[in-house]
Amino acid sequence: MESSEEEDDLPSIESITPQSKIDSVHQSLTEKGIRKLCCELLDLKDAVENMCGDMRTKYLAFLRISEEAVEMEHELVELRKHISSQGILVHDLMSGLGREMDEWKRSSGDADESEEVEEPSPSELTDPNSEFLEKIDILLAEHKVDEALEAVDTEERNNPELKGAADTSSYKSAFIERKAVLEDQLLRIAKQPSVSVTELKHTLNGLIRLGKGPSAHQLLLKHYATSLHRRIEAFLPSCSSCPNTFPATLSKLVFSNISLAAKESASMFGDDDNPAYSNKVVQWAEREVEYLVRLVKENAAPSETVYALRAASVCLQDCLNYCKALEPQGLILSKLFLVLFRPYVEEVLELNFRRARKVVFDLNEADEGLESSSDFVAVLSEFAIASDTTMTDCSIRFMQIVQDILEQLTHLAVLHFGESVLARVLQLYDKYIDFLIKALPGHADEDGLPELQDHTILTRAETDSEQLALLGAAFTILDELLPKSLVKVWKLEVENGGGDGGDSSSSPSLISSSAPELKEWKRHMVQAFDKLRNYFCLQFVLSFIYSREGLTRLDALIYLTETPDDLHLPSLPFQALFSKLQQLAIIAGDVLLGKEKLQKILLARLTETVIIWLSNEQEFWSAFEDESTPLQPSGLQQLILDMNFTVEIARFAGYPFKVVQNHASVVINRAINIFSSRGINPQSSLPKAEWFTEAAKSAINRLLMGSDEASEAEEEYECEVEEGEEDGHIVLPEMDDDEHSDSLETSSLSTMDSFESFASASMADLESPSFTDSES
C-alpha cells in the first residue's frame, strides 16, 4: 500500500512526450499538407488546361462562323444583284407583253368591224426595240465590242431622242444600261497590263465614241505612266554600275515617254480644241518630273562625292535640253524642274566643298581620287624649295580638289549654278589664306583672324624666303591657275594681259563682259589675298620698327635731339629700311622668279606701310606737340628729307609710288603744321622742294655705292630681315596750308586700328596693273 501511494505522488513517466516523437508528428503533418497542396495545384492545372482548350475551340468556332458570315454576306450581295437583274428582265417582259396586248386588242377590234379578218404576220407582232436589245445583249455576252459599238452608234443615229434628257422611257433606261455594260467591257480591255498600244488606242477610241473622253484620256496617261515605271524598275538595279551616267538614261526614259504621251493625246483628243486635256497632260508630266528627281536623289552616290556632283550636272544638262525640246508641244517644264532639282544640286555642291576643306587643310586626310600629274603641280612645286613642303602640299591639294570639282560641271550647270560655285571657291580660298596666315610669325588670336580649330600648323615660315614662297603660291593660284581652270569650264575667250618687268608668262584674264559674275568674284578673291599680303607687310614693318625688347627704333627723338650732318643723308632708321628692302628684293627675285608683278606690288606696299605707321603713331606726334620740348628747324628738315627719301625709293625702283607720295605728303603737312603752331616759319627755315628731291636722289646713290653710312645704319639697327628694293626717283611738290588741310581730308587711311588695307589704292593692280617707270 505504501508503494502504491508513492507512485501516485510522483508524476507518471509515460505522460511526458519525447521531443523526437513531437518532431516526427509535425514532420508527418507538414508532408501531408504539402502533398495535399500539390494535389490541389495539379487539379487546378488540369482545370486551367481544360479551360484553355475550351477557349481555343470556341475561338476557332468563332473564326469559322465569322468566315461563314462573310461568305454569306457575299452570297447575299450576289443574290441581290441576281434578283435585281431578274427584276429588270421581268419588268421588260411585262412592258413588252403589255404593248403586245394593246396592239392585239386594237387589231382584234378592227377585225370585228371589218368583214374580212386577216391574220397578222409575225413581223407585225415583233417589237424593233426588243429586237435591238436582244441583239445587243447577245453581242455583249459574246464580248463582240466592235459590233456592239456599231449597233449602239446606229441606234443613236436612228433614234435621236436616246441622246436627249427629256425621254425617260423604259427603253431608254435599258439602252443606257447596255451602254454601261459596253463601257465596262472596254475599260477592262484598256486596263489589262498586256494590252498593246494599237489595241489600247482602238479601245480608247471606242470609249470616245461612247462619250467617255475624260475616262479614255485618263487611261491613256495611266498606261504611259505604268509602262514608264515598269521600264525604270527594270533599269534601277544597274544604276550602281554607272553612277555618273545613270541620270542621263533616266532622263531619256522619262522625257521620251512624256513626249509620246503628249503626241498621242493631241492626235486622239485634239488638245488644242479642248484645253482641259492639255492641262491634264501638263499635270501628269509634272508628276513624272517629280518622280524623276526623286529617283535621281535616291539612287545617286553619296552627296559628298564627285560622282554625285557629276550625276547632278549630267541630269541638269539633259533634263533642261529635253524640257526645251518639249516646249513646242506646249509643255513648259524647265522652271518646275529647276525648282525641284536646285536644292539637291546646292546640297551636293556644299558637301563637296566641305570635303574639299577637309582634304586641303587636314594633311593626314588622303583622297586617292585626286590627280597627281596635273599641270599646276609642277608650277606650285617650285615654291617647295624655299618653304616647308607641308604648306606647298596644301596649295597643291587646293588646286587639285577645285579643279576636280570644276571638271564635273556641265555647261548648263555652270549657267544656273555658276555664281554658287564661284562663291564656294572664294570661301575655300579665303580659308586657305587664313591657313597660310597661321604659318606666318606673330600670328595670334587677337589679330582678328578666324581660327581653323580642327587643323594645326606643323611648322611656321620663319625665314623671308619661306614667307615669300607662301605669298607666291597663293598669288599663283589667284592670278594664273584658277583663271585657267575657270576658262575651261566657263568656255570664255582668253585675252593675254600684258605685264611689266619682262613678265614672259602672261596670265589669262576672263572677259568681264562675257561673265560679269567672274569680275566680281575676282575682286573678292583679290581682297582675300590682300589679307595675306597685308599681314606679311605688317609683320615685316613691325619687326623693323620695334626691337626685340619692344622699344621703338623710329621715334621723335631722332628729329628733336640729333643734328643733321653735312652729307644730307636720311636718318639711320630710313637708311636701314633701304638696306632691308634691297635684301628683300634680292630674295624675292629668287623665290618669286617670273612674278615681277607681285614683287613690285609687295615691295611698294612695304614702303607705303612704313609711312602709314608713322602717320598714325600718336606717341610720335605727341612728342612734337609737347610744349616743353624745344623744336629745331633742322628736325623738320630731316623729317621732310626722310619722307622724300622713302618716296624716291619707290619711284627709283619702278614701284607704284603715287600712293606712297600721297601718304608722305600727309606726314609732311602735319609736321609743317605742328612746327608752324610752335613758332617756326617753314618758308624761311626750309630749303626749296627741289633741294629735298636732289638730296634724296644723292642719298640713294651714296647708299647704292656702299658708303660707310649705310653699313653703320644696318649694323646699328640690327637689320635681320633679308629682303630689299632696287631704285628710286621722285619729285615732291611744295605744300602750303590749304593743300595740307585738303590732304588730311582726303586721306583714305586716317587710323591704324587695323591693317586691313595698307594702301588707299585697291589691289586692282592685280587685274590690270599699270606700272610706270617715271612720273612727271
Image: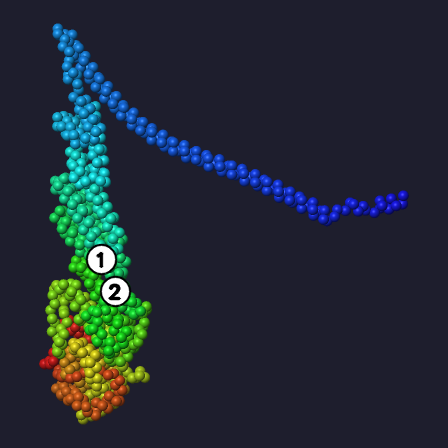
- The residue drawn where x is 11% and y is 81% is 774
User: Going from the N terminus, do you reach mark 1 or mark 2 first?
Assistant: 1
Residue at the image point whose x is 18% and y is 73% from the top: 763
Q: Identify the element where label 2 is drawn.
A: loop
Which residue, given by chain and number where applicable, does mark 1 sit on?
Answer: 244
For label 1, the crowd category at 10 Å Cα-Cα, with few meaning under 14, some 14 to 19 and many 20 or more, is many
The C terminus lies in quadrant: bottom left
Residue 444 placed where, x, y %? Answer: 31, 74
* Disc 1 to disc 2, C-alpha distance: 15 Å
Locate the N terminus by quadrant.
top right
In the rendered image, which quarter is residue 620 located in? bottom left
Disc number placed over residue 203 in the picture, else none: none
Looking at the image, the residue that sits furthest to the bottom is 566
**Residue 673 appearing in the image:** no
Look at 17% across and 18% down and name the residue there: 126
Q: Which residue is mark 2?
A: 369
